[in-house]
Image (cartoon, rainbow, N blue to C red):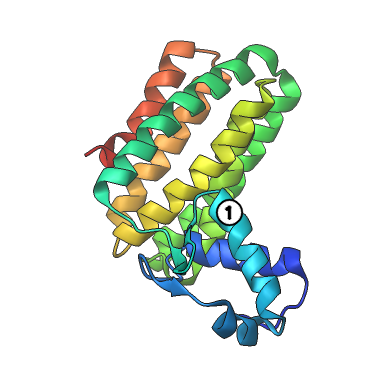
Amino acid sequence: MPAERTGTPDIYADLERRLMTAGFASGAKLMPSALQHEYGCSANTVRDVLLQLSKVGLVDFEMQRGFRARRVSAARRSDIARFRILLEQEGAVGSMREGGLAWEARLTAAHHSLSHIEREIERQGKMGSLLGLWSDAELAFHETLISACEMPVLIETFASIYKQFRQQITGLEEAYSPEFLHHIVAEHQAILDAALSRDEDALRAAIRHHQRRHFG
């Protein structure tokens, strides 16, 4: 159970993370009257937060039926992964063209933080409690990758799609094994190397390769 929180931004952030890291089962009913006791707030506050989360695709809402965690499926994961590739390829290539040394430095720093967490997960031999921390670091790396593309709508859309993707993958993967993570570590390095070498074809290929396992 999360620590008691009364501020709407805190409640939003906590529910968002739980939805993105399999904190709720696929299709689980989300009842404001129950969640209000967890967060120490009113049911209306929880309802407003769930409505906001439905706008980014993490929650399903139907009149008279209420809220449910978005259902996960291999088909939806594949669809989201393919769309994510299109967005990330264009955003990354745009950043490579428009971003300068400052963007390269930010990207390198984001990758360093992500690599540090990934090495610790490999050392422990399991994802365990580090899932949320790793998810945050991976998002930061991919957001930094597209951050200099000068296309605000693309960046905004990517943020929503990434969150939906993370919800789908954590809901379908029973465990992040060391073998699973080993491939991801190499893929992140390939993306970084291509970006820093200013090789557009290699960067597009590395981004697609990173998502290939999620195709149906």
State the residue lying farthest toward the left.
216
Element type at marker 1?
A: helix
Asked which quadrant contains residue 157, the reply is top right
Image position of 5 (left or right of 35): right
Q: Residue at x 52, y 77 (%)?
A: 31
Residue 145, by quadrant, is top right
Outermost front residue? 64
Q: Is residue 24 above or below residue 196?
A: below
* Residue that badge 1 annotates: 136
State the residue in front, 33 or 157.
33
In the image, residue 95 above or below residue 135:
above
Q: Give, as a three-letter code, the residue at label 1.
A: Asp
Name the residue rendered at 64%, 82% in the picture: 36
Q: Quick check: can you spot residue 184?
A: yes
Q: Position of residue 107 (x, y in %)?
A: 63, 33
**Point 49% across, 12% down: residue:** 199
Q: Where is residue 117 shown, x and y percent of the image?
A: 53, 56
Q: Position of residue 124 (x, y in %)?
A: 41, 67
Residue at point 37% right, 37% down?
81
* The N terminus lies in quadrant: bottom right
Residue closer to the observer: 201 or 32: 32
Viewer-nearest residue: 127 or 36: 36
Given the current orientation, which residue lies at the most extreme bottom position?
Answer: 37
Report the side of 140 relative to 123 (left or right): right
Q: Quadrant of the C terminus?
A: top left
